[in-house]
Image: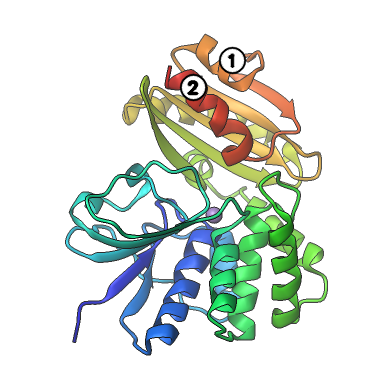
Amino acid sequence: MSQSIFIIGHKSPDLDSVAAAIAYADLKNKLENTSKYAPRVAGEINRETKYALEKFGFNAPEILANAASENLILVDHNEAIQSSDGIAEAKILEIIDHHKVDFKYAEPIKVLIEPWGASCSIIFNEFKKNNIAFDKNLAGLMLSAVLVDTVITKSPTCTEIDKTIIEELSRIAEIDDWKNFGMEIFKVRASVSELTAEQIIKSDFKDFNYKSGKVGIGQVETVDLNDFGAREDELMKALVDLKNKEGYQGVILFITDIIQEGSKFFVAIDDLEKMEEALGAKLENGKVYIPGIISRKKQVLPKFSEVFDK
Ligand SMILES: [Mn+2]
């Protein structure tokens, strides 16, 4: 038997990266009439991913901790710093993503990147382009991913294409009220009371390499910012510990209130001035609430590149 090809998303896997791996493996296996494509994850899955997998009857993909010498298709990321360890020794066959590109490879490969709200939107479109039907449960899983990534269409990353896809997926999944279903997932996502501060920070956390050093940025969405009020000191302390322990220039957590549509930032960094420039706001004891900001990719990262790559 030929070697398996693993389809895998980023470290600290979110729902979109896991659902995209499962969906794209299904599409590739059907297109090539094989079973050699298999989804994998780059770490422990989070609670809303678990919830959606169980709801629609999927097993959690196995963890691939080291990618060296494996054949891979990357979904929902392209930056090596966000991939499984050993990525430099892996063979990469394709990339399907919707993030900024920071990718270098010695061979020409298929790269499919669209500025859409979710990797699952791109993969849904691939199913349609290839005229491959898919079942109700896969539709439900992909719908969950698109709803989370687009913050139930509220995020500035959500395009008209995503909105159409949400409607189509809801129809196939037989989910009448996708807004309500989206809120259900966000309530699961937001129930953090039993998590440690570090688990909260790491639940949707990404590393970025800038000229001035490595920055880690975590985001948590909530339906009520006040839920975190009592834990602010604890979160700040965990950010400082993480920064010192893992050699970051800065570590940031921002908690997004999806009802108020704004985010509270918590920052541990040596160069506070730079961070204030990047955020366009003054920090008070390392914290600031900024109305209107809900997207890391579209509203936070562009300014970070400007400031930290100088
Ligand atoms: Mn995504």
In the drawing, what numbered circle is on residue 113?
A: none
Residue at (41% x, 53% y) in the render: 10
Mark nearer the N terminus (2 vs 1): 2
In the drawing, what numbered circle is on residue 268?
A: 2
The spot of residue 99 in percent (x, y) is 51, 47
- Quarter-of-image position of residue 93: bottom left
- Quarter-of-image position of residue 291: top right
Task: Give, as a three-letter code, the residue at label 2.
Answer: Ala
Whether residue 21 is situated above or below residue 173 in the rendered picture = above
Q: Is residue 139 visible?
A: yes
The spot of residue 256 in percent (x, y) is 68, 39
Task: Give, as a three-letter code, the residue at label 1.
Answer: Glu
Is disc 2 surrounded by few (<14), some (14 to 19) or many (20+) residues within 10 Å? many
State the CA–CA distance, disc 2 to disc 1: 12 Å
Quadrant of the rendering where the N terminus is positioned? bottom left
Residue at (41% x, 38% y) in the render: 207
The spot of residue 220 in percent (x, y) is 61, 43
Mark in front: 2 vs 1: 1
Whether residue 7 is situated above or below residue 198 in the rendered picture = below
- Quarter-of-image position of residue 108: bottom left
In the drawing, what numbered circle is on residue 276?
A: 1
